[in-house]
Amino acid sequence: MKQLLNKLLESFHINGRDFAVFLLALLLAFSIWIIHNLSLNYTDYLKVTIVSKCNIDGHSDKSANKCDVIARCRTRGYNLIRSKLREDKKVVEVEFNPAVMEYDSADMYYVKSSDLMEYAHLIYGNDVNVDYFITDTLFFRHPEVRHKRVAVNPVHSFTFKQQYMESGSIDLVPDSVTVYGEAFLLDNITQVNTKAIRLYDLDSDERGLVQIESVKGIRMSASQVSYSVGVTRYVQMNSVVPVVVDDTPAGKEVIVVPSSVRMSLKCRFPIESDPFENMTVHIPYSDIASSLSGKYAVKIDMPKGVLDYDSEPAIIQCLVEER
C-alpha cells in the first residue's frame, strides 16, 4: 500500500513535503468552512426543562415538578449544537412574576404560552431568538407551606492561647430564623445549625459571618448569620473557702462533709479586688431538706470579675441530726 501511494505521488510529481503542505491546507480549509457554517443562523425546535420560582403567599417559592418548554428558535449553529447537547441534562430555574402565575386547583398553578415570551431570554439564553412557543400551558405544583420561628444553634470549636478564655457565650445576629415548609417537615425542626465555626489560638475578640446549614425541602428567612466571640485574659487564683448552712431550724443540726472546699477561680485580668474576700459557700437548709441523697453541688454567687470557677470536692455531703 505504501509503495502504491509513493508511485501515485511520483506520477503527479508530488514529493512528501508537498503532500504534507497539501494536507495542512486541506485541514485549514475544512476548519474555515466549519467555522463559517457554525456562525450562520439556523432555525430549529429546541426543548428546555424548567422549574418555576415564584413568590406565592403560603406556598413554596420553588415548584415541586419540572416542565418541558418547546419553541421554534433562531440562533447560530454553535449555539444550536450546544443547546441540543444540553437538552436532556440541564434544568433551568425561571423566576416568574406572580402576576402571570394563575391558580388552577389545590397547589397547582399555570403559565400560558402567551406570557412565556417575556421569559424567553431566561429559558433559552440571550443568544437565541424565539419565533413562537409550541408548548401551550405549563402547570407547576407549588406545595402549600407553613412557617415557624426556630433558634439558630452555633456549631463551633474554639481553642485559646494560654490564660485566655471565652468571655460569655457566642452571640449570633439574628439568633433565630423563620423556616418555611410543608407541615410534616416543620414538625421535625426545632432548631437550625450553622456550618462549623473553627477558630484557633484566640487572644482577642473575633467576629464574622457563617452560613446556616440548609435543610432539604425547607426555605429560611436568612441564609447566614453574623457571630461574635468575646475573648478575655484571665489569671487563676486558689483558696480554701468555708461551707455554711443557712436557715437551719431550731432542733436541727447539719453536719457538712467536708466543712470547707478548695476553690479555683478564673478571674478577669487585671484583678480589681480580692475575689476571696468574705467568700463562703452557702447551702440553704431547704435544699438539704428536699434532697433525697443529702448531697449538694457546690455553688457560689460569682464575685465581680470572676469568669468561671471549680471546687474540690464538687459535691458536699450533708447529714441532718436532731439536737
Image (tube, rainbow, N blue to C red):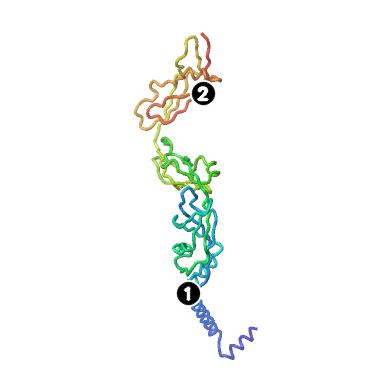
Residue 313 x %, y %: 50, 24
Task: Estimate the spatial distance between the alpha carbons at disc 1 and disc 2, rounded to whole Å.
Answer: 86 Å
46 horizontally vs 162: left or right: right
Residue 136 x %, y %: 52, 63
> Quick check: 46 above or below 59?
below
For image coordinates 50% across by 50% down, the residue present is 60
Q: Earlier in the sequence, mark 1 or mark 2?
A: 1
Identify the residue position indicated by label 2 in the image: 315
In this rendering, the label closer to the viewer, 1 or 2: 1
Tag 1 near tag 2, CB within 8 Å = no
Identify which amino acid the numbered label 2 is placed on.
Ile
> Quick check: 249 above or below 239?
above
Q: Considering the numbered disc 1 on the image, is that residue within a helix, a strand or a loop?
A: strand
Viewer-nearest residue: 68 or 296:
68
Q: Considering the numbered disc 2 on the image, is that residue within a helix, a strand or a loop?
A: strand
Q: Which mark is residue 41?
A: 1
How many labels, in total?
A: 2
User: Can you tell which quarter of the image residue 269 is in?
Assistant: top left
The 10 Å Cα crowd at callout 2, few under 14, some 14 to 19, many 20 or more, is some
For image coordinates 46% across by 17% down, the residue present is 245
User: Can you tell which quarter of the image residue 165 is in?
Assistant: top left
For image coordinates 49% across by 49% down, the residue present is 59
Identify which amino acid the numbered label 1 is placed on.
Asn
